[in-house]
Amino acid sequence: MPHPLHPDAPTEDWIPLVGAAMAWAACLGTALMAIVLLVVRRLVAAGPAVATPDAFAPPGVMLLLGSLAACGAAFGAAWRGLRPIGNAYRQAALAVVAALATLVLGFLSVPVHHFLGAPGLAGVAALAALGAGAAWRGVRRHTPSR
């Protein structure tokens, strides 16, 4: 009996791999974003008090470049984790979702800093790093051997 979707439809179930790869990428990006926020807070605290913030001062530059680096790391992690599916379009689309999830989770880390301070951000980074490690094991477990 032919496959109900199409004769060339994949026979593998990629859902567990996609879930693990996306979790790995989002957790990695979140850990890096929390570290970036910690560094930015330290730069702000170490600098002089100013009436109007300068976007090109070290904290602003660190926030911009660090956020882009964290999103890029999440994109790269998702791309790497999704490599076995063999479809560049799906890899890219899901990697962009992981990068955007990093931004959202980074924004959600700001209230943690507001209520718990630097130890709260360090806790977010540690928990996200632990989650990334667990998710990486899931990626390895669901990657088919060749």
Image (cartoon, rainbow, N blue to C red):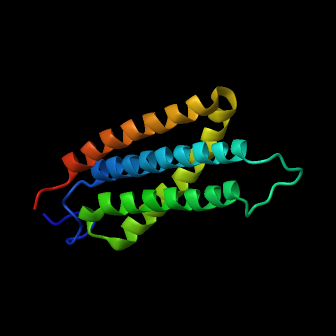
Residue 138 in which image quadrant: top left
Where residue 43 sits in the image (x, y, percent)?
Answer: 66, 48
Find the residue positioned furthest to the right: 51
Quarter of the image where the N terminus is located: bottom left
Quarter of the image where the C terminus is located: bottom left
Q: Residue at point 36% right, 63% down?
A: 79
Find the residue positioned furthest to the top: 116
Where residue 9 sits in the image (x, y, percent)?
Answer: 24, 67
In front here: 146 or 128?
128
Q: Residue at point 28% right, 64% down?
A: 83
Where residue 13 sits in the image (x, y, percent)?
Answer: 24, 54
Relative vertical location of residue 98 with respect to residue 10 in this rendering, above or below = above
Q: Residue at point 31% right, 39% down?
A: 134
Relative vertical location of residue 117 with respect to residue 26 in this rendering, above or below = above
In front here: 125 or 88?
125
Q: Residue at point 59% right, 46% down?
A: 39
- In the visual, does 134 lie left or right of 56? left
- In the visual, does 35 lie left or right of 75? right
Residue 127 in which image quadrant: top left
Marks counted in the figure total 0
In front here: 75 or 4?
75
Find the residue positioned furthest to the left: 146
Relative vertical location of residue 2 with respect to residue 115 in this rendering, above or below = below
Relative vertical location of residue 62 with respect to residue 121 in this rendering, above or below = below
